[in-house]
Image (spheres, rainbow, N blue to C red):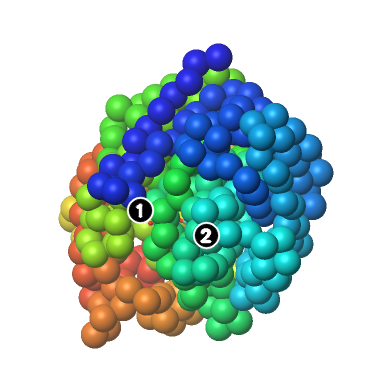
Amino acid sequence: MKTRTVNVALGGRSYAITIKRGLLDETGPLIKALGFKGRAAIVSNPVVFGLYGERAIKGLKEAGLEAVTIIVPDGEGHKSLKEVSSIYDALIEHKMERSSPIIALGGGVIGDMAGFAAATFLRGVPYIQVPTTLLSQVDSSVGGKTGVNHPKGKNLIGAFYQPRAVFIDPEVLKTLDAREVRAGMAEVVKYGVIRDKGFFEFLERTSGKLLGLGAEIEEAIERSCRIKAQIVGKDETEAGLRSILNFGHTFGHAIEALAGYGSYRHGEAVSIGMVMAANLSASLGLCGLSIGERVKGLLDSMGLPADPPQIPPESFMESMMLDKKVKGGRIRFVLTEDIGKVMLKEVKEEELRAFLEGFGAKRKT
Ligand code: NAD
Ligand code: GLY
């Protein structure tokens, strides 16, 4: 099996992302090779641990490491300070030390929460990401955004804290629900739109094979991670460039909230949001309408939604004006100039309203 490696270059906090089918069985020796010994805590949930926990523990044992298991309940609703506190309790109970690594085995919920526990326990202990959903393999495990939700909003509490390594085994995606695979694909498409036309064309050529998790998925994961690593390497804390990773997310977040959380997977809402952002770009004269059509075509071929639900423009406006990117009645959007080329631009409230009203009118025809 081919091993692919992507480096996240952040000086003394640099780390490698390793991608290989079957890598799960090698994580023990790889963690040992990073210099860890003694105990390692695996943080996971019952679903993922039930599927992959035994193999992860076996690998650690074979490498001479003692595995401590910490299981938290499954689901976004449990990405909370309460569960982080239960992780601290278990770490203390098992006498984990400053040098003992935490291994996040799961999707983005586990990765974000275990990463935040690692950032804060004993003022910071090392952690390793073993992401098991497509979204976490191409996005959340890379770049060091860790955190939990607050009852008032998603991801309001957190820290930038980079992992020591990311181990990606594309084979584990075979047990993932097909809808979750498609939702993850939205973030893969995002990388093509924001940064790499050649990658976008690769996705157009291979979308069917990607959904079937053929060999092409490894290349898609590697190229996605490479793009994210390059952006994070230039702007770790989202002072500027990193915000292009939010392409489609302003509309997407509003759709998620207005349709009721749970109606859309995050990736599905982002899928619709990306088409809207491309169309907004066209309405502002930054590109032609063909860009939105091409993005929509690729998303369609991946079974992702591209049309927004019937939401009155005023509700859209209200929801987006609550966004943390609003300043003085203007929202900063990531807008398309071409496939592979985006820009950050503040859009005035009236421009946005005019777009939403025109867009709604067009949808009714
Ligand atoms: P998730 O972690 O909830 O996983 C989705 C579901 O799949 C869960 O039920 C999980 O138990 C299950 N699962 C995971 N791996 C599986 C496997 N291999 N086989 C079968 N089932 C499996 O959801 P997600 O989409 O991975 O992550 C969403 C979270 O990621 C959100 O909380 C979001 O805020 C966060 N996120 C963070 C970043 C970041 O930069 N840190 C970026 C994007 C998203
Ligand atoms: N998912 C957006 C980021 O990591 O910045």
Whether label 1 touches label 2, CB < 8 Å: no
Element under disc 1: helix
In the picture of the structure, the residue carrying the numbered disc 2 is 98
Q: Crowding near pointer 1: few (<14 within 10 Å), some, many (20+)?
A: many
Q: Residue furthest top?
A: 1
Identify which residue is drawn at 39% across, 24% down: 202
Query: Percent x, y for residue 328?
Result: 24, 85
Q: Is residue 60 left or right of residue 328?
A: right
- In this rendering, the count of numbered labels is 2
Q: Residue at x 70, y 71 (%)?
A: 89
Instruction: Provide residue 344's location: percent of width, then percent of height.
Output: 22, 60
Instruction: Kindly identify which numbered label has been placed on residue 347.
Output: none
On-image quarter of the N terminus: top right
Q: CA distance from mark 1 to mark 2?
A: 32 Å
Which residue is labeled 1 in the image?
245
Q: Is the distance from the Cβ of mark 2 to the nearest ligand 1 atom less than 8 Å?
A: no
The foreground one among 192 and 11 is 11
Q: Position of residue 19 (x, y in %)?
A: 50, 29
The quarter holding residue 54 reads top right
Could you say whether the residue bearing mark 2 is in a helix, strand or loop? loop
Quarter of the view holding residue 160: bottom left
Q: Is residue 302 above or below residue 213?
A: below
217 left or right, relative to 212 = left
Dot 2 amino acid type: Arg
Is the shortest distance between ligand 2 and the CB of mark 1 under 8 Å? yes
- Identify residue type, mark 1: Leu
Residue 142, above or below 201: below
